[in-house]
Amino acid sequence: MRFVPRTKPDGGGTITFFLALGAGRQMCRLAMTFQTQKQAFSYLQKYRTEFERIARARLESGELEDGVVVLSML
């Protein structure tokens, strides 16, 4: 996975990552409420398998927003 952090003025933010699908990649965006990137990355790594499973299921069912799989914290 490749990660791209983005923070919001209210302290929350998103991490964008790419889900590997054979030779292709699917962009996924995870909304978070952590104050630091370190906390956000730690959380994402801890639940990485679960987020990948959810992202694949949403992709298969067509739940995309502007071509992006949107996720939120567990």
Image: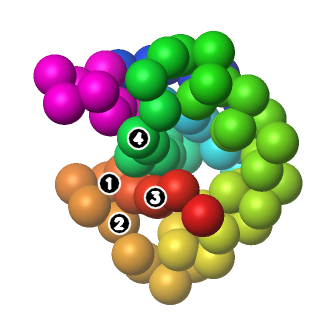
Determine whether label 4 and label 1 are within 8 Å by CB: no
Q: Is residue 21 visible?
A: yes
Say above or below: 37 vs 30: above
Question: What's the residue at 77%, 61% (across, down)?
Answer: 50
Dot placed on the residue nearer the N-terminal end, 1 or 3 = 1
Q: CA distance from mark 3 to mark 2?
A: 13 Å
Name the residue type under label 2: Leu
Name the residue type under label 1: Gly
Question: What's the residue at 83%, 54% (across, down)?
Answer: 49
Q: Quadrant of the C terminus?
A: bottom right
Q: Which mark is residue 67?
A: 1
Per the image, label 2 sits on a secondary structure element best described as loop
Find residue 18 and report its image quarter: top right
Q: Which residues are magenta?
A: 7-14
Q: Which residue is mark 4?
A: 33
Q: Which residue is mark 3?
A: 72
The x, y position of residue 66, in whole percent, is 22, 54
Determine whether label 1 and label 2 are within 8 Å by CB: yes
Magenta stretch: includes residue 41: no
- Circle 1 Cα neighbour tier, 10 Å, few/some/many (<14 / 14–19 / ≥20): few
The answer to which of 44 and 69 lies nearer the viewer is: 44
Say above or below: 31 vs 37: below
Say above or below: 61 vs 39: below
Determine whether label 4 and label 2 are within 8 Å by CB: no
Per the image, label 1 sits on a secondary structure element best described as loop
Disc 3 vs disc 2: which is toward the camera? 3
Magenta stretch: includes residue 13: yes
Q: Which mark is residue 64?
A: 2
Determine whether label 3 and label 4 are within 8 Å by CB: no
